[in-house]
């Protein structure tokens, strides 16, 4: 099995991960279901699973740190698994830094949990529902 990937953008990268697993008889559907469960649970907003046939530029400004491309998940033989995930090199990382800043601010004595009123706050969108790339707005 093999795939060809062309990544023509400077901002989006791909991880092509191949591992041997201890569990025999696992299917690609099992693997994708496990990633979906994580993305809908403890990794909500950090991990996503994509079922659409997208290309690298479609993941530009993605707020999540990594997006599993479910169509490329493969199981080879009885115990070898391949997972492909896309990520925006800088944007997803920046979102995690913003998450950390919000966490620190929430724990800081005397810090307000409400908006700061800072106009830059509009650029720090952490909700996966916000599909716009605010950094490019004037």
Image (tube, helix red, strand yellow):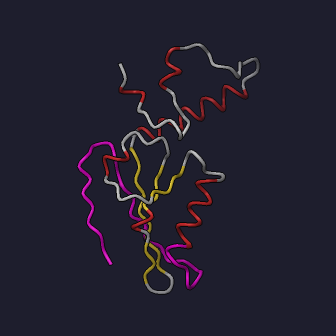
Question: Quick check: is 39 in the magenta stretch?
Answer: no
Question: Quick check: is 14 in the magenta stretch?
Answer: yes
Which x, y percent locates residue 12? 34, 47
Q: Nearer the viewer, residue 3 or 33?
A: 33
Magenta residues? 1-29
Residue at x 36%, y 42% (from the top left corner): 60
Which x, y percent locates residue 49? 49, 57
Which x, y percent locates residue 34? 59, 66
Q: Nearer the viewer, residue 49 or 80?
A: 49
Residue at x 55%, y 85% (from the top left corner): 25
Is 80 above or below relative to 108? below
Is 18 above or below relative to 113? below
- The answer to which quarter of the image holds residue 75 is bottom left
Left or right: where 2 falls relative to 109: left
Residue at x 50%, y 45% (from the top left corner): 64
Q: Nearer the viewer, residue 48 or 107?
A: 48
Which x, y percent locates residue 115? 63, 19
- The answer to which quarter of the image holds residue 14 is bottom left
Left or right: where 103 falls relative to 70: right
Quadrant location of the N terminus?
Answer: bottom left
Magenta portion: prevailing SS class: loop
């Amino acid at each position: 099995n093999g795939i060809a990937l062309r990544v023509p953008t400077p901002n989006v990268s791909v991880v092509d991960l191949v591992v041997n697993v201890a569990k025999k008889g696992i299917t690609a559907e099992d693997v994708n279901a496990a990633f979906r469960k994580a993305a809908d649970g403890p990794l909500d907003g950090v991990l996503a699973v994509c079922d659409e046939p997208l290309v690298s530029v479609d993941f530009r400004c993605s707020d999540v740190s990594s997006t599993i491309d479910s169509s490329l998940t493969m199981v080879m033989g009885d115990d070898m698994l391949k997972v492909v995930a896309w990520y925006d090199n800088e944007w997803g990382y920046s979102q995690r830094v913003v998450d950390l800043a919000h966490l620190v601010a929430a724990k800081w004595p005397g810090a307000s949990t409400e908006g700061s009123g800072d106009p830059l706050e509009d650029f720090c969108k952490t909700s996966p529902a916000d599909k716009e790339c605010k950094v490019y707005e004037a």
